[in-house]
Image: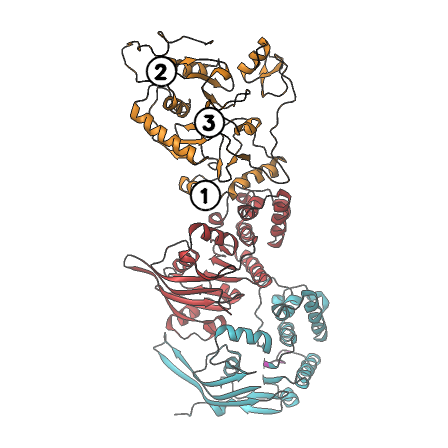
Amino acid sequence: MIELRDVAKTFTLHNQGGAVIEVMRGAHLRVAPGECVGLTGASGAGKSTLMRMIWGNYLAARGSIVVAGLDMARAAPREIIAHRRSQMAYVSQFLRVVPRVPTLDVVAEPLFALGVPEDEARDRARNLLARLNIPVRLWPLSPTTFSGGEQQRVNIARGFIRDVPVLLLDEPTASLDAVNREVVLRLIAQAKARGAAIVGIFHDEAARARVCDRVIDVTDFSPVAA
Amino acid sequence: MTPLLSVQGLSKSYGRHVGCLDVSFDLWPGEVMGIVGESGSGKSTLLNCMAGHLAPDAGRVMFDTRAEGPVDTLRLSEPARRMLTRTDWAFVHQHARDGLRMGVSAGGNVGERLMAVGARNYAGIRASAVDWLDRVEIDAGRVDDRPGTFSGGMQQRLQIARNLVTGPRLIFMDEPTGGLDVSVQARLLDLMRGLVRRMGLSAVIVTHDLAVVRLLADRLMVMKDGRVVESGLTDQVLDDPQHGYTQLLVSSVLQV
Amino acid sequence: MTSFGQKYPGGPGAEPLDIGTHYNFAYLDEQTKRMIRRAILKGLAVPGYQVPFASREMPMPYGWGTGGVQVTAAVLVPEDVLKVIDQGADDTTNAVSIRKFFERTAGVAVTGRTQDATVIQTRHRIPETPLTADQILVYQVPIPEPLRFLEPSETETRRMHALQDYGLMHVKLYEDIARHGAIATSYAYPVMVAGRYVMDPSPIPKFDNPKLEMDAIQLFGAGREQRIYALPPHTRVVSLDFEDYPFEPSKADHACALCAATGSYLDEIITDDAGGRMFVCSDTDFCQSRLSGATP
């Protein structure tokens, strides 16, 4: 479902003397449907970078990144947009929202974009928000004033509202208490059970051990030290 | 599937000064393209050439019309072009007073396009006007008020309603949130996102505000000195800029 | 035939008196008349289209009918019988002045009776008596452009006419209904001519609009704005409206206090300081003809 071959990433900082920073080379990764692969490595080693390349947010300097049949490294922008809409979900660490939109609609939006009728989309959003223990009174409010943990749960709800074959999770349990961590891990397990391919970054070793079938250390893809 | 809009080799110069040079891109139905750049980058020149307000020196602007397929809008006859700008196209100006008739009521402003294409039933026109005021969150009770009595944000929303009433497929926007208070901008952007999605609009938005493009645009073109220096997926261009100028722009944005 | 005022000594066809300055027939020189006639022919060929013309200095100020006077001067021949009315009356100052002007410079016969006239110059009314194919009606026009008050730019209004881009005209009517509950325009009511041009029929009351479809030739002259337009006989003229707010040529519900006519346009005349008033036919010839028993 996800296949990376010989992927490399370089940043060229034109405004800082043209400094060229190679952060990754020769990256390989395969994730089958129903599998969850965890990315590990020290901070700054390239875990988020790799995930962003799979999402199409970062360009790859070399290699191929085939996700659910589309090579994200070579696809045209509108192909990537369509693919993200129907095949992929990305739960990042930060919730970036338009100021006025109520939480319910923030979560339902990926379904709106697919053309799901608004009532049905909101119903599914309600279910997820309830599962993630977001109080009903918060649903009509914009999440901009929520706590870190609440924002993270809204983010997760948004990521899990569609049943997509590819899920990318960046620290999904980071700001959560034990109860909600359990809810999220169960959501991940359910996604695996229905055949989704998942790539996740978990600092929490217990969580990682629970859901990941394999672990890849991205330092294996670091450029060879001089 | 053909692109809705295909800009090919569009160039415009003012004597020796380059307005925009050899710009080409395709836009598909439902896509929003952002064009960013600082003052003097040529983005407004480009927009005005595309929309037919300025005559370019070279290039074509192919639009996929419903009746005849792709047509070079730069070579349309004036009546055909006027019909296009009144039905399938929309243009939202930076200053609402350039896009509204200040001497005419809100209802008259929204209804004008309908009347221009032959609507002759007063009750029907008024009902459409009220419906659209509602959709852009202007109190329907203000339907008979003149735009001069509206706030800047309301004027801008009225401009949007006036443009969208005939169900266009492509909307050009020139700094749509420029000059508005921040809270007002947020409301307007949210409204535009909703309308673009619900109406399946394609849009070309020119702005110098990177936050606006991140919110509204699927794709992005960065312009400098009349040339496109980088283009691609909005989040990719903003998060992983390749060109030196883009990197400069992105790093210059103040964090709040 | 009857006439009012001073008849030109010698009558039609006689040698003009030397009064110190020799006037060409009907004041304007022949080249100017040719220019105006060309404009008139263009106007007749394209009904409702405003033809620009080089308006001349006339011995009366702008705003006092110079356009109408120039058109009349261009179409008059010595055998014509001229009638001049101002708001329907033959005896107001302006009507008298213009009639005297043509008596002096053209020596034509003049009359107050509509059916005896061959050329009728009018300010702001159409005579009640139906006109015939042998007659010409000349209107004095202040602002020829029906879109002027909505679109101040001349280049833009010309383009709108050229492209038949008249949405704005209906916006004006829409605004009227929104503000007053009905189309409030009561004079200078815009019309669509021969299905092509929107025209301002000059400030005639909307009551007169249906008469715009007639057997006579109608010529419109605007001196200050330098435009001439025309309606050939039997041209289709439709007053603009909405389906659900159709055009109504309204009038006051009174009969004329003098001649008891119920179908003519009435003037309201204040008779004393106590608010007393009476309604009288605006068309003086029409009223007097009825009173004197002659067939109107």
Residue C259 horizontal/vertical position (percent) = 61, 13
Q: From the viewer's perspective, is residue C50 above or below residue A163?
A: above
A43 w.r.t. C107: above or below = below
Which label is found at residue B166? none
Residue C2 horizontal side relative to residue B125, left or right:
left
Q: Which residue is mark 1?
A: C160
Q: Is residue A170 magenta?
A: yes
Q: Amino acid at mark 2?
A: Ala
**Disc 2 crowd, CA 10 A, few/some/many (<14, 14-19, 20+):** many
Q: Which chain is orange?
A: C
Dot 1 or dot 3, earlier in sequence:
1
The answer to whether residue B38 is left or right of residue A179 is: left
Q: Which residues are magenta?
A: A167-175
The quarter of the picture where residue A84 lies is bottom right
Chain in red, by letter, is B
Report helix, strand or loop for mark 3: strand
Residue matched to label 2 = C106
- Colour given to chain A in the rendered image: cyan
Nearer the observer, disc 2 or disc 1?
A: 2
Judging by the rendered image, the residue that carries numbered circle 3 is C217
Q: Quadrant of the N terminus of chain A?
A: bottom right
Is residue A171 on the magenta stretch? yes
Disc 3 versus disc 2: distance between alpha carbons? Answer: 21 Å
Q: Position of residue A55 (x, y in %)?
A: 53, 79
Residue type marked 1: Met
Q: Amino acid at mark 3?
A: Ile
Q: Chain of mark 1?
A: C
